[in-house]
Image (tube, rainbow, N blue to C red):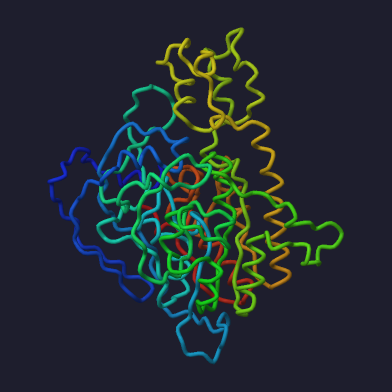
Amino acid sequence: MTILATALAIASVISCNTAELIPEISFDAINYSIRADTSKIKIDKDYKKLKDNHQFSKVLIVTSDTVLNYKKPKMPKPPKNKVDLSKLKKDKTDKKEFKMIAIGGGLTAGARDFGYFNEGMYTSYPNLVAQQMTIEKFELPLFPTGDYNGVGRMVKTDVNPSGGPLQKFANIKNNGASKGIDETRGRPGSGSKDPILDEYSGDPDNLAFPDMSRQDIREYIPYVSPLHGRIKAKDKTMFEKLKNKEFDFFILESGYDDLLAALTSSRDAHLGFENELMLGNNPNNLDIRTYSNPEWALIRDVISPKKVKGVILNMPDVTKLPIVLSGDLVFKNSLLMFEGSPLRNYGEVPFLMPSGQIDSLLSTKVNIALKPGINPNYPLKPQSLLNDYRLQPFPVTKKNFQEQAEILSKQYGYAIVDIATLFDKVLSAEGTYTEDGLNVTADMFFSLDGMYPSAIGQAMIANEVIVTINKAFEMDIPMISIHEMMY
């Protein structure tokens, strides 16, 4: 069972006038506290429009609405003793508190269950690493207490009007962070409109946000991503923000959201490595790695001059993620294999993406004459099919990401966190065992969306980061007990 299935609220019909108190919660980790005041249930304005403009609406089947109460995140116990971080300090004579930053997309931000919300931020792997390192303060760009459900969050539902085999979801209609829909703005290529979000007033150390493209590292266009603008509205680019921010250690993750965008057709993806990794016979010639490569430019022009230590995450194979459906689902459906069916040659489409059309196609309730792909008046939409043309960029892109991480590691001394191997182990039939003996399979590691990790998955990534730091920099940071993340 996935982690947040237990968080589904039983109340699904609450009027706007109903006031329900949420008990005060406390988050006592990293030697400081974040207090949440009591808050009333509030039904969000335009929540139905938000559902229709969801980033992953093409792979979501939303059949109902519900209310989701706040649930205190399950956090591992912090280390009993203070960790000596002097080896990682930029200036060992500096008496200021140790500062770590994280840069990345939804994977690093703690996105899960198709959304971005406070509970996920707390259990994001950088925050868990910060706790295990006993860093005094690692600031998260939390939504206000009353907006604890953030944006885009979904939960499972048993409502299944189509009778199809794909999982259906309920739209969260309470305590979201959106103040409405901006009909004039949206990420190019996404076909959706942006939610209106308040700017985060603090100075976060987790500089990550869902749907971050590689170009977002260097460019800042406020209307391209409201989550981007929310944490960097006072600074035009990530470059400028980091140039003005003092830190001792960094974590960098880049590319995961671009790979997801290409996989789900949620927006235009920036996968091109043309003129970026032109290794040829001269891999040490940095001049040929033009400024078009955001990761290289960030390291070269901003981070490296600060003479800080850090780690870089490599990229897993996203075509193996649970959200991708095997074409066997069609082959096993005898109704679709009749002579003359255009789907008899489905071998040309090895993978499917979840959608209402695919669900209808596989449903035993939908009349075969009405099934998309069979009825010529109701063709299958391209985003439902992962054909060879769409799959072609992924192996090359993954290889280039791996090469980039390796070269940056050799050039600047930054260690590589091998999450690609971790994902492969988790996605295998037998799963993988944690240090404390827990057998973790894909349904435990990933959240409801089948793309981003659950709290358990984030903790396992945090442990990979900790192992890498300990080995590369001769540290002794305590590991997380994954059993403690179960709830």
Q: Quadrant of residue 61?
A: top left
Which image quarter holds the N terminus? top left
Above or below: residue 60 compared with residue 148: above
Point 61% across, 47% down: residue: 424
Q: Nearer the viewer, residue 243 or 128?
A: 243
Q: Is residue 93 left or right of residue 112?
A: right
Residue 343: percent from left, percent from top: 59, 17
Q: Nearer the viewer, residue 471 or 262?
A: 262
Above or below: residue 233 compared with residue 306: above
Q: Is residue 249 left or right of residue 198?
A: right
Residue 347: percent from left, percent from top: 66, 23
The answer to whether residue 128 of the structure is visible from this angle is no
Residue 170: percent from left, percent from top: 33, 37
Point 27% across, 66% down: residue: 26
Residue lying farthest to the front in this orientation: 184
Q: Is residue 112 left or right of residue 21?
A: right
Point 67% across, 60% down: residue: 293
Q: Is residue 189 left or right of residue 348?
A: left
